[in-house]
């Protein structure tokens, strides 16, 4: 038994080799004198896009349309060509007493002591257990991530008849994967009054996906010994319950950041996202530790995560150059119907968030949202946006609406009217 | 219909490979006996033994003077010592009984006195300040408590597996998926008609857990009746672990034992169990009512726990008996023994039950000649958090990089551990079996990241086993 760790001292350590981490690495590697090390626990870097079979990746960051796996490969190549070192199969298991990262890899135990750490660990879907869905505990119950791993990376087949829980963008992604694997989606269930994300899909995709969507319903029980046999569905209006025979259940959406490292470091979390509370330049509450990607806004598309990576790179360079942090920030608080808003802090004078957009999540569909920004009881900005706020996808708010925020005047409240 | 079998008549057949049956088979196979251990399910410890509160009890609250009290107290020492030798993970966390109302507060002196009558003298009554000093995260309103420093948490999965593994290494023939459907007594041997053919043995030991009374009836008895009592449990995320470092027990009342909050040996926090009397002996489903009940209780005991994420939910069936004590008896004429009505205390008492039962069997005429050629006890993989696991052991990784290859990220389970489990003395037959041996897929993501990979490893191993005819 030995716990001796080999020290590694890169200039920057990036935890997570998904779109955010890889893009940050690609930006930083040519710009810093020391090494840029990406720690990826999976066998291959690339993150979630690795197992997203469908197209639509790379639009905002690479200005082209790629499939998930092609996008993932391109991001890996980009980081490698820029000179970043990507260690795969390397899992960060915690923080060392000295503040370094403890890493387990096939070639041993390491302690990574970097001048800057970027957390880019992404987000995952809450499984059935965390959603407290009672019943039997048979095989055949998945999250989208599990399902897509199974189908696209391991070339396995789920069952023949699936019930998909949720009607977000990711839910339709699950339907596509199921279809590709020869599994029919017999029901899509959502507690919401409408299947919002459906309207966002291109018409071509819509025509091919004939999926019965039941709004205002929920899963109240999973039935089956060994393998799923049925789910019990409840009409939340009438309370009526019935069984839907199926052999596969996919729980989609309901994201939670992989926040273990952030929390164990004592970094402040945003109560809405449960990811690190960052400012517009993606600093966490711990000096020298930064965060990027979907752990901050669970979840947006991969290209937005990657653009976070580019954004955080500039802040890391400022940190390495010894530039001082702009003055004290004020908290940005999401008000109804917004569940969360990211970043969580605004520092007057900072560059502001990536693409000049605050990212938010709404619990209600608002077709013509009027965004209201208030501080100290006063409305400081109000603007009608030309795009709807829809549950299940990120709602974008121009960060210029924060220009009137005054330091020291208390929390900034952002809500919809 | 019976099929001719070439297997010889065993000296003893033990029915039920839970913690009690495995302990009995292990103890028997320390003697010159041909022992066969049968279980209806596909794995050892797959009934009551797998889904309980996993506490190594001092026996402080048993009914003084009962066989159960005696065997729990004895079993506590036996299992603890065995755990040290074999590496079954356990942590001496201690327990704190918390009184939330005057009735419960008034019950504490009686409980302390009862503990003393059970030979346990370390329990101490404490006031509310000390209660909150010990567990600051408790909700408001605690009036006092009783400390039981000897209570420990233990890995119930590894405990059963260690006993069964040692039994097998000592020569016990383990027959899984062999449900005993009927029995035919004979002058020299009893034939057990199982779902996979007949098994004959001179002596039969009934350690069938929840099925114990049904089997007992096949031997003509009507001395105890069991029904399943379902206990649902919520397991919270490891991030909740700093909230509680010891077992927080309720004060038992007329309404039952109540709900506890306990750290788990795997670094989580557990809330439960419910206690629901059932008729179906296979229904281990969880329920809306069960969850609602636990959340309601949890909100009072430790509101901050409920702000954390739930990692897993379980339900176990424990055997509730109409007899107030264990039924451990031997019928010399039929060469038949029973260990029945052994409730959740069986995890702690199992080895003492085996010791006691062997004594009875010897008196009844079973020849017990000790072997001198016993193999060393097994060294079980550590799947607990009290000691370093392979992912944090530089030496092991240097010797074998598979221990540095983390496959299940949430639980930090390595490829090497999964490989070892798949080629162990009693390999798993399904995903649940692999989970119990390694913790793989038991974490907060429940397979989001690793599910496809881990099930792939299992399927490849089972495919190989099929080809080799090992299953």
Image: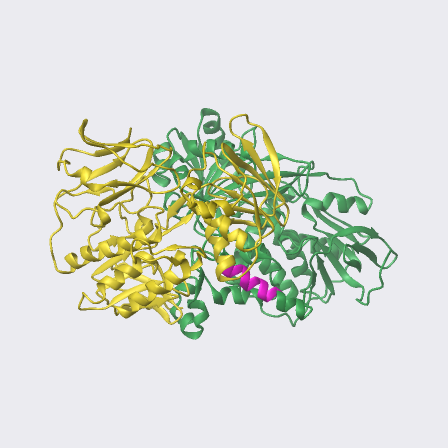
Residues in magenta? B452-462
The answer to whether residue B465 is left or right of residue B242 is: right
Q: The N terminus of chain B lies in which quarter of the figure?
A: bottom right
* Residue A373: % across, % down: 22, 33
In the image, residue B335 sits, relative to residue A373, either above or below, namely below
Task: Give the colour chain B carries in the figure.
Answer: green
Q: The C terminus of chain B lies in which quarter of the figure?
A: bottom right
In the image, residue A35 sits, relative to residue A201, either above or below, namely below
Task: Give the colour chain A carries in the figure.
Answer: yellow
Q: Main secondary structure of the magenta part?
A: helix
Q: State the colouring used for the structure image.
A: by chain
At horizontal 19% and vertical 53% (from top left) the residue drawn is A287
For residue A252, say whether it is visible: no
User: Looking at the image, which is closer to me, B81 or B290?
Assistant: B290
Per the image, is B461 magenta?
yes
For residue B231, say whether it is visible: yes
In the image, residue A86 sits, relative to residue B182, either above or below, namely below
* Residue A213: % across, % down: 52, 38
* Residue A305: % across, % down: 31, 52
* Residue B269: % across, % down: 44, 45
User: Looking at the image, which is closer to me, B73 or B421?
Assistant: B421
User: Looking at the image, which is closer to me, B291 or A171?
Assistant: A171
């Amino acid at each position: 038994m030995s716990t001796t760790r080999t020290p590694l001292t890169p200039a920057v350590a990036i935890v997570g080799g998904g779109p955010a981490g890889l893009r940050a690495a690609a930006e930083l590697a040519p710009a810093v004198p020391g090494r840029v090390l990406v720690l990826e626990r999976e066998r291959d870097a690339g993150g979630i896009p690795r197992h997203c079979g469908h197209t639509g990746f790379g639009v905002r960051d690479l200005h082209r349309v790629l499939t998930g796996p092609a996008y993932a490969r391109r991001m890996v190549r980009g980081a490698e060509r820029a000179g970043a070192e990507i260690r795969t199969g390397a899992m960060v298991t915690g923080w060392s007493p000295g503040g370094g990262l403890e890493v387990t890899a096939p070639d041993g135990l390491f302690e990574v002591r970097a001048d800057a750490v970027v957390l880019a660990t992404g987000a995952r879907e809450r499984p059935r257990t965390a959603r407290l869905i009672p019943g039997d505990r048979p095989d055949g119950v998945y999250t989208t991530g599990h399902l897509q791993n199974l189908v696209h990376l391991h070339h396995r087949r789920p069952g023949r008849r699936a019930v998909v829980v949720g009607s977000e963008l990711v839910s339709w992604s699950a339907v596509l994967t199921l279809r590709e694997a020869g599994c029919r989606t017999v029901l899509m269930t959502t507690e919401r009054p409408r299947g919002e994300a459906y309207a966002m899909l291109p018409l071509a995709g819509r025509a091919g996906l004939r999926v019965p969507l039941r709004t205002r319903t929920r899963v109240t029980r999973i039935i089956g010994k060994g393998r799923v046999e049925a789910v019990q569905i409840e009409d939340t209006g009438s309370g009526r319950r019935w069984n839907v025979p199926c052999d596969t259940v996919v729980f989609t959406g309901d994201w939670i950041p992989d926040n273990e490292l952030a929390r164990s470091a004592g970094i402040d979390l945003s109560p809405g996202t449960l990811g690190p509370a960052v400012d517009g330049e993606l600093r966490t509450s711990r000096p020298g530790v930064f965060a990027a990607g979907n752990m901050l806004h669970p979840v947006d598309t991969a290209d937005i995560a990657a653009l976070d990576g580019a954004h955080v790179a500039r802040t890391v360079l400022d940190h390495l150059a010894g530039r001082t942090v702009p003055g004290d920030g004020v908290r940005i608080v999401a008000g109804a119907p917004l569940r969360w808003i990211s970043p969580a802090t605004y520092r007057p004078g900072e560059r502001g968030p990536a693409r000049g957009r605050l990212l938010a999540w709404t619990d209600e569909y608002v077709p013509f949202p009027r965004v209201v920004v208030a501080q100290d009881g006063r409305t400081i900005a109000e603007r009608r946006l030309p795009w709807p706020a829809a549950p299940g996808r990120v709602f974008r708010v121009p960060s210029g609406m924060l220009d009137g925020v005054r330091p020291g005047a208390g929390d900034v409240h952002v809500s919809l009217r | 219909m019976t099929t001719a079998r070439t297997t010889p008549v065993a000296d003893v057949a033990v029915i039920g490979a839970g913690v009690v049956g495995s302990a009995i088979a292990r103890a028997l196979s320390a003697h010159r006996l041909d022992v066969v251990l049968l279980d209806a399910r596909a794995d050892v410890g797959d009934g009551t033994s797998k889904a309980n509160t996993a506490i190594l009890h001092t026996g402080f609250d048993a009914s003084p003077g009962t066989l159960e009290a005696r065997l729990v107290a004895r079993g506590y020492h036996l299992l603890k010592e065995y755990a040290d030798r074999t590496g079954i993970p356990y942590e001496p966390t201690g327990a704190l009984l918390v009184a939330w109302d005057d009735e419960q507060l008034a019950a504490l002196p009686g409980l302390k006195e009862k503990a003393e009558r059970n030979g346990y003298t370390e329990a101490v009554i404490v006031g509310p300040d000390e209660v909150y000093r010990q567990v600051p995260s408790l909700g408001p309103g605690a009036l006092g408590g009783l400390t039981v420093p000897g209570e420990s948490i233990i890995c119930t999965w590894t405990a059963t597996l260690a006993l069964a593994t040692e039994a097998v290494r000592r020569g016990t023939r383990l027959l899984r998926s062999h449900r005993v459907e009927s029995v035919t007594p004979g002058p020299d041997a009893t034939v057990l008609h199982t779902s996979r053919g007949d098994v004959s043995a001179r002596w039969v030991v009934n350690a069938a857990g929840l099925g114990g009374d049904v089997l007992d009836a096949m031997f003509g008895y009507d001395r105890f009746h069991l029904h399943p009592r379902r206990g649902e449990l919520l397991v919270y995320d490891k991030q909740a672990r700093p909230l509680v470092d010891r077992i927080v027990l309720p004060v038992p009342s007329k309404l039952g034992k109540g709900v506890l909050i306990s750290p788990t040996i795997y670094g989580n926090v557990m809330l439960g169990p419910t206690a629901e009397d059932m008729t179906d002996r296979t229904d281990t489903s969880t329920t809306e009512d069960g969850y609602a009940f636990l959340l309601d209780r949890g909100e009072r005991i430790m509101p901050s726990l409920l702000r954390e994420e739930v990692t897993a939910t379980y339900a176990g069936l424990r055997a509730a008996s109409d007899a107030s004590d264990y039924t451990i008896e031997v019928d010399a004429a039929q060469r038949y023994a029973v260990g029945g009505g052994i409730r959740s205390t069986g995890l702690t008492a199992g080895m003492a039950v085996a010791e006691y039962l062997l004594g009875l069997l010897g008196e009844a005429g079973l020849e017990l000649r000790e072997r001198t050629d016993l193999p060393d006890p097994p060294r079980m993989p550590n799947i607990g958090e009290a000691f370093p696991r392979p992912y944090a052991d530089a030496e092991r990784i240097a010797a074998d990089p598979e221990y540095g290859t983390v496959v299940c990220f949430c639980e930090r389970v390595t490829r090497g551990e999964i490989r070892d489990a798949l080629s162990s003395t009693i390999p798993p037959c399904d995903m649940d079996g692999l989970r119990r041996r390694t913790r793989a897929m038991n974490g907060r993501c429940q397979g989001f990241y690793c599910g496809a990979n881990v099930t792939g490893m299992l399927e490849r191993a089972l495919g190989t086993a099929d080809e080799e005819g090992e299953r």
